[in-house]
Image (cartoon, rainbow, N blue to C red):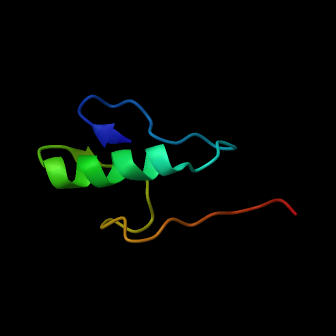
Amino acid sequence: MCYPPGIPILAPGERITAEILDYIEYAKAKGGCNMTGPEDPDILKLNVLTGR
């Protein structure tokens, strides 16, 4: 989630698409917003868990 505005970027079960990765890069570069939720605060990697 990028705060503000506080709208989640990804939800459990959602596919990670190129558009989502582009938005994460945009939000990181924009500055002025805090990224909350990822285990890696610099968002250099995303942990993906599967139930398989």
Is 49 left, or right, of 33 in this rendering?
Answer: right
Is 11 left, or right, of 37 in this rendering?
Answer: right
Residue 9: give x, y in percent of width and height: 45, 39
Location of the N terminus by quadrant is top left
Q: Residue furthest right?
A: 52
Residue 39: give x, y in percent of width and height: 45, 65
Vertical order, 44 against 23 (above or below): below
Residue situated in front as seen by the camera: 45 or 41: 45
Q: Residue furthest front?
A: 18
Vertical order, 21 against 9 (above or below): below
Quarter of the image where one finds residue 13? top right
Quarter of the image where one finds residue 14? top right
Vertical order, 4 against 18 (above or below): above
Location of the C terminus by quadrant is bottom right
Residue 28: give x, y in percent of width and height: 24, 54
Name the residue located 46 percent from the left edge and 44 percent from the top edge: 19
Name the residue located 30 percent from the left edge and 67 percent from the top edge: 42
Residue situated in front as seen by the camera: 12 or 16: 16
